[in-house]
């Protein structure tokens, strides 16, 4: 066999998918595409309704679409962007389900009233028959089409049981309405079950509506990431400056970025200097000084001066584009956790169908002269009592109560998966800046020259405040806030000068004053006292930033600026450790600052100086060790790690992107809410398991009785109407048990 055959060149593309309604559908789409000739790999992102396909270049998207259309799915092949196409399809699908649910409910209400309170009124049966038809075969037709698709693929899910139970209940009820004499002549009262069929369709549709609403919001994070890149930019040309679309920029183009504008592409500075907010990349709140030959990144914000840059990476090759791509891949590669109910349904559905068929066959064989009647009643009773209503309510009711209780405690939980998984977390990764710390630089300590009088310090503070109030330096506000709290008199200064990357200079009363770093003082021959050097050495070892204030001869003061620990951070981390959870710090900040915070909070695992992609890799490495990882962050730079983590938690004050990617948001940004979220998860999962017990105990007892096991003993046959009531009571039990969660403390 020739193993040296040249591999055909391939093309990788993401397509929006239509027709997917559950994780089983996603699996089917993936399988069908994977086995399509010319396709090398296919990976479905069910959360975003997209599939990433690697296929040979001689295969067209139309061929892929045709393969899916044969089994009821499809690809959206459009000139619009993936994001636009996905959003349009998700919005269309959500509106369709909303219309179906509302329509089904409007028709179900009169059917339910007639069936429960006017069951013996014959005209009411005909009215119910007419009203039930649109509920099942118009508003609920997707249950039947999905069940048929599953059957063609030799699979069964909850849609299968919904379709069978409601379909057979309808057909049996319709027969009893049109031909009531058939059962009457056999001595059996012909009951109808239109209300059971319509209520099941409406309840399950409402559950799907809630699920679709949650799912449709998952793409907003990518939309906001994409929104970080400006749509136009100013290109510097031979004939002057021109505004062009971002898509038209080329490698090597010279670009002008004005104060307040976003950097449009990756590049390097060729002229000008400014401070640039790079928090989306590093997570650090202090803007970075940029001058000639320094690197710039798309999506970051130019704060003060104008910059001219040369494009070194455009389009899909910028750092921002790579963050967007990696977030997409992270969301797509993390297949939805197969819910406990779905796993049970995989066994339960075919088992119930088999039991119903066996019941029919046995009664047809041994039922005597009324064998057909008994066979029909018993087999339908089995399907009705095993209706998935209670099973379908078991998880969502507990989750809804759990989410509500979380909201009461300032914990917003977006999906059931995270609420279920949080109780399994054994490793938590905390971003440093804005998560453990405040994310706002403050003057943490200071030292004035020893021989200065209080009056002199008061006057000098006034001069310092006036100088810093004019400064472009990002730490100037911290100094202003600090000395401003002393309520000093404002002193007029003159000859103000901004010294790029070092600090500022100004004159007052014929004396020059300086505010800035050590190199500013050294270059101007200014003496720094030993006490201030010792102060600076100690603070530097703690990862603090030092700012000096001096006149033209000697240093007058030194200020230590740092990001303060949040109230409660230390307590929360200790609580997590007491729960047996391993805590890690992951930050873009320098090693010294990270180690200092780790020492203060008692965290042993620290990783500093990491880029956004490295944060995601760090999460993956822990998951490969078999750990269930929760990521807690607040910035755009955390978005990939949040997307990859098993449980993602955003701080409420953080970026919109972080909160959109994360499935849990702490409104108060108090880390002490994390242990509460974990305890809430444990209570909710316990409630779900109890609900499943109640949902099944009726089936364990009821199905054999419905099948007629007591008939040979005492002649008792379970009426399908009683079976329906038992099914309803199991649902009441499930809802009542879920509501008990409200009273339990977390």
Image: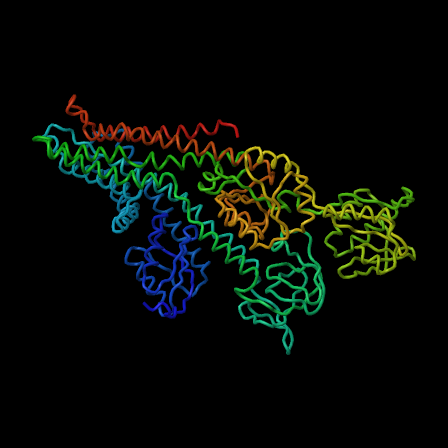
Residue 691 occupies quadrant: top left
Say if 356 sits above or below 280 in the image.
Answer: above
Instruction: Please name whichever residue, 364 or 507, is drawn nearer the observer in this view of the structure.
Output: 364
- The picture places residue 354, in percent across and down from the top left corner, at 22, 39
Let me know if residue 660 appears in the view.
no
What residue lies at 81% left-to-right and 55% top-to-bottom?
A: 518
Q: For the view shown, which residue lies furthest in the top direction? A: 714
User: Where 269 falls versus 99 (above or below)?
Assistant: below
Residue 230: x and y in percent read: 57, 62
Q: Position of residue 76 (x, y in %)?
A: 38, 60
642 relative to 14 in the view: left or right? right
- Give the residue displayed 35% in from the left and 51% down from the top: 27
Q: Is residue 224 left or right of residue 588?
A: left
Near-viewer residue (190 or 153): 153
What residue is rendered at 64% in x and 78% in y? 238
Relative to 96, residue 295 above or below: below
| Colour setup of the view | rainbow
Please state which of residues 10 and 98 is positioned toward the viewer in this rendering: 10
Location of residue 124 (image quadrant): top left
Is 105 positioned to the left or the right of 164 in the image? right
Image point (16%, 22%), residue name: 713
């Amino acid at each position: 066999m020739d193993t040296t055959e040249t591999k055909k060149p391939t093309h990788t593309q993401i397509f929006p998918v239509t027709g997917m309604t559950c994780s089983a559908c996603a699996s089917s789409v993936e399988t069908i595409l994977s086995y399509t000739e010319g396709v090398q790999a296919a990976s479905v992102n069910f959360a975003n309704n997209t599939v990433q396909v690697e296929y040979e270049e001689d295969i067209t998207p139309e061929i892929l679409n045709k393969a899916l259309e044969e089994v009821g799915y499809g690809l959206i092949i459009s000139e619009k962007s993936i994001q636009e196409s996905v959003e349009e399809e998700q919005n269309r699908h959500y509106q369709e389900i909303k219309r179906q649910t509302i329509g089904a409910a409007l028709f179900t209400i009169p059917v339910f009233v007639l069936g429960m309170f006017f069951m013996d009124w014959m005209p009411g049966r005909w009215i119910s028959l007419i009203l039930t038809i649109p509920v099942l075969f118009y508003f609920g037709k997707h249950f039947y089409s999905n069940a048929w698709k599953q059957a063609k693929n030799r699979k069964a899910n909850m849609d299968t049981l919904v379709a069978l139970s409601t379909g057979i209940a309808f057909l049996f009820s319709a027969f009893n309405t049109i031909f009531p004499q058939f059962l009457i002549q056999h001595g059996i009262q012909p009951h109808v079950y239109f209300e059971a069929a319509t209520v099941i369709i409406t309840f399950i549709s409402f559950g799907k509506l809630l699920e679709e609403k949650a799912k449709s919001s998952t793409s907003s994070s990518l939309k906001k990431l994409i929104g970080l890149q400006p749509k136009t930019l100013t290109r510097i040309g031979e004939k002057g400056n021109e505004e062009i679309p971002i898509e038209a920029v080329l490698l090597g183009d010279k670009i002008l970025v004005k104060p307040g504008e976003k950097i449009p592409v990756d590049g390097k500075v060729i002229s000008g200097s400014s401070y640039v907010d790079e928090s989306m990349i590093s997570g650090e709140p202090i803007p970075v000084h940029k001058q000639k030959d320094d690197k710039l990144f798309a999506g970051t914000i130019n704060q003060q001066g104008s910059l001219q840059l040369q494009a070194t990476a455009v389009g899909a090759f910028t750092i921002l584009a790579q963050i967007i791509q990696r977030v997409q891949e992270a969301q797509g590669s993390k297949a939805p956790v197969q819910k406990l109910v779905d796993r049970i349904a995989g066994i339960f559905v075919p088992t119930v169908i088999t039991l119903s068929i066996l019941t029919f066959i046995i009664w047809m064989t041994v039922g005597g002269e009324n064998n057909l009647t008994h066979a029909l009643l018993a087999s339908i009773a089995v399907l009705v009592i095993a209706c998935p209503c209670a099973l379908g309510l078991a998880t969502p009711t507990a989750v809804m109560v759990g989410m509500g209780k979380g909201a009461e405690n300032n914990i917003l939980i977006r999906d059931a998966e995270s609420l279920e998984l949080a109780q399994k977390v054994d490793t938590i990764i905390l971003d440093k800046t804005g998560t453990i710390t405040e994310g706002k630089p403050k003057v943490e300590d200071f030292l004035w020259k020893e021989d200065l009088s209080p009056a002199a310090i008061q006057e000098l503070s006034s001069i310092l405040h006036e100088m810093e109030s004019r400064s472009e330096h990002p730490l100037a506000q911290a100094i202003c806030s600090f000395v401003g709290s002393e309520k000093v008199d404002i002193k007029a200064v003159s000859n103000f000068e901004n010294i790029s990357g070092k600090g500022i200079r100004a004159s007052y009363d014929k004396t020059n004053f300086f505010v800035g770093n050590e190199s500013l003082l050294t270059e101007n021959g200014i003496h720094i006292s030993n006490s201030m050097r010792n102060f600076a050495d100690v603070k530097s070892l703690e990862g603090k930033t030092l700012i000096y204030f001096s006149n033209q001869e000697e240093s007058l003061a030194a200020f230590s600026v740092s990001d303060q620990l949040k109230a409660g951070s230390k307590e929360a981390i200790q609580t997590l450790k007491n729960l047996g959870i391993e805590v890690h710090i992951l930050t873009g900040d320098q090693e010294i600052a990270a180690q200092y915070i780790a020492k203060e909070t008692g965290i042993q695992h620290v990783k500093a100086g990491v880029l956004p992609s490295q944060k995601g890799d760090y999460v993956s490495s822990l998951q490969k060790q078999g750990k269930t990882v929760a990521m807690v962050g607040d910035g755009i730079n955390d978005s990939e790690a949040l997307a990859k983590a098993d449980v993602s938690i955003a701080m409420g004050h953080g970026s919109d992107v972080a909160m959109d990617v994360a499935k849990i948001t702490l409104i108060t940004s108090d880390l002490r809410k994390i242990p509460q979220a974990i305890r809430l998860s444990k209570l909710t999962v316990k409630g779900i398991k109890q609900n499943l017990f109640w949902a099944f105990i009726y089936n364990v007892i009821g199905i054999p009785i419905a099948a007629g096991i007591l008939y040979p003993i005492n002649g008792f046959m379970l009426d399908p109407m009683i079976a329906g009531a038992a099914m309803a009571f199991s649902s009441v039990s499930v809802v009542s048990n879920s509501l008990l969660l409200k009273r339990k403390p977390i």
